[in-house]
Image (cartoon, rainbow, N blue to C red):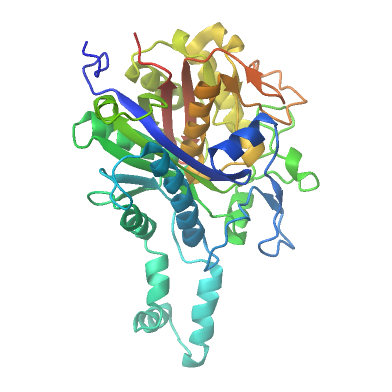
Amino acid sequence: MAANLDRQGRPLIVVTGMGVVTSLGQGKDDNWTAMMQGRSGIHRITRFATEGLRTTIAGTVDTVPFEPQCAPALSEKLASIAAGEAVAQSGVGRAGDFPGPLFIAVPPVEMEWPQRLAIAEALKDKDPVTTRDFVARVGQGGFESFHELFLFGGVADRIADKFGTKGSPISMSTACSSGATAIQMGVEAIRRGETDAALCIGTDGSVQAEALIRFSLLSALSTQNESPEQASKPFSKNRDGFVMGEGAAALVLESYESAKARGATILGFMLGAGDRGDGFHRTRSSPDGKPILFAMKDAIADAGLTPDDIDYVNAHGTSTPENDKMESFGCMAVMGERMKEVPISSNKSMIGHTLTAAGAVEAVTSMMTLAHQRIPPTINYRTPDPAIPLDVVPNEARDAKVRYVLSNSFGFGGQNTCLVMGLEPAA
């Protein structure tokens, strides 16, 4: 095997730059410090009125000003911050001239209530009598900015322009696995020889009233509003739902050969990815757990490893009753009794569920775990669930020998993507 190829004869892929922003702060260092301290970024929502809502808490990013107040605008702002940090660390290319494609996970886009109300107000004297009339009048002019703002792919276009990525930017929205999927697409592009570098981003700034209402109607959100910092409690018996969060993360992936040739600092190896679809239900996982466990198996095999090689699992760990149980069953099925001794923890206990961004945020956290040989805790773990007999790294960070990390991302609609990262390639 050549030094720059993996066991399957494909180019080895390394990470040379990372950036992240969450409700805990901006930048890798601030986020890592907060996680090591077990701090929570979840708080009461102040950005908009929450009277009458069942859930009034979230991990919003309130330190980043953005206009207009809508998910695409904030998602773009967060993506720009994370990508700026990642590209600067990598040192690849030149400012505004990134030598590879952009793969970006963005939240589903549709016009939000403030813009709908603005249109209704502008047209209130025109007395539209049918939906067709209303749409036709909107299309006659004056609302081009709304069209550009809520056009799916618009965030990607503007990020591509800013960083000078090559080719058509690829936008994707595969629910909660989106951020991991963006990384997987970068891995595959480099392996196919299409590029030596890829900018992979997951971003989500969609905490707004309508999103809270929709998730509440699915009974998916925690309603423990009285103690925001304690509401997200993955793997605990008294978990009652996830807490929405916002954030973005970016990773610069490069072929090992290219990175070494330019003398780049290698932060770690992106070794494997696996994905499986699950058409069982719009929100629920298949009861047999097969898509989840096969996504994990595929990622480990793609990395050239076995389940016994995994030293730590960065869990999807949403804090919903069903998801945590299914993830536990899946991990046990893949790793057997050994899984009871493999550390597993959920970053979502501290930052909430960053939805489209989650897979990328957790990939950066996994890489930091490898770099520091220290595992982030699952905070708020005080009431163990006897049905989940796992080592969830409760409440405090832990020093550990970690060579290989499995990071799980399981999305609504049965979209499951797992990544394997390491300090070194498989032997």
Q: Taking 172 as reference, is 262 above or below it?
A: above
Quarter assignment of residue 154: bottom left
Residue 196 coordinates in the image, percent (x, y): 24, 34
Residue reaching furthest to the bottom: 125
Quarter assignment of residue 319: top right
Residue nearest the viewer, comparing 253 with 280? 253
Residue at the (55%, 71%) spot, across then down: 114
Residue 166 coordinates in the image, percent (x, y): 24, 49
Residue at the (64%, 16%) spot, across then down: 391
**Residue 157 visible from this viewpoint:** yes
Residue nearest the viewer, comparing 36 with 248? 36
Q: Is residue 388 left or right of residue 4?
A: right
Residue at the (45%, 56%) spot, across then down: 76
Q: Taking 165 as reference, is 305 above or below it?
A: above
Residue nearest the viewer, comparing 342 with 17? 17
Q: Quadrant of the N terminus?
A: top left
Residue 23 coordinates in the image, percent (x, y): 62, 46
